[in-house]
Image (spheres, rainbow, N blue to C red):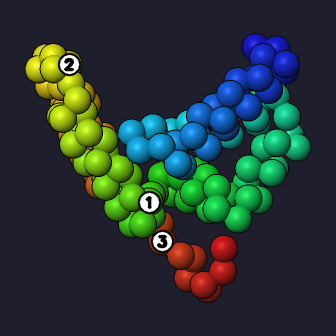
């Protein structure tokens, strides 16, 4: 993959992650992880910025070092999935589509709640 393609994809996934911050139903963390991965291939500056970001950095470091998701992130994600499902339940007329979305959301919730919570280092520093 070329550096330019990786950089374009990094910014694309970062944009989707930022959309996910404000819109229910659009995931944030998976897009943020993809943005960080592509940034690592395309832009050391963007990669460093993501890892040093006051909010995103902790999420990325926790995932990279421990494969962990904070309790707060899990709660917000599950609440957004529930809110999105309720909105779709009212709006979707196709029951098969709703069933497929329900199965996907259940799988996402199971994955999220099964991830460990980040553990602090013994000396209390990060």
Residue tagged by mark 2? 97
Front-lying residue, 90 or 38? 90
Give the number of the disc on residue 119: 3
Relative horizontal placement of residue 78, taking residue 8 as reference (left or right): left
Q: Nearer the viewer, mark 1 or mark 2?
A: 2
**Residue 87: quarter of image:** top left
Which circle's residue, 2 or 3, is located before the other in the chain? 2
Which residue corresponds to the image point at 73% horizontal and 54% vertical from the top-left?
51
Front-lying residue, 78 or 30? 78
Residue tagged by mark 1? 73
Percent x, y of residue 106: 21, 39
Query: Dot 3 lies on which element?
Result: loop
Percent x, y of residue 119: 48, 71
Cα–Cα gap, marks 1 and 2: 27 Å
Furthest residue toward top: 1
For the N terminus, the quadrant is: top right
**Residue 111: quarter of image:** top left
Which circle's residue, 1 or 2, is located before the other in the chain? 1
């Amino acid at each position: 993959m070329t550096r330019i393609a990786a950089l374009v994809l990094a910014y694309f996934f970062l944009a989707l992650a930022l959309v996910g911050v404000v819109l229910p139903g659009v995931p944030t963390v998976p897009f943020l992880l993809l943005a960080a991965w592509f940034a690592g291939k395309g832009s050391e500056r963007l990669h460093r910025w993501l890892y040093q970001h006051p909010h995103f950095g902790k999420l990325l470091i926790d995932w990279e070092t421990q494969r962990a998701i904070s309790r707060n992130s899990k709660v917000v994600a599950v609440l957004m999935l529930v809110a999105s499902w309720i909105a779709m339940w009212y709006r979707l007329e196709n029951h098969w589509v709703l069933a497929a979305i329900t199965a996907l959301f259940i799988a996402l919730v199971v994955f999220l709640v099964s991830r460990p919570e980040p553990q602090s280092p013994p000396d209390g520093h990060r």
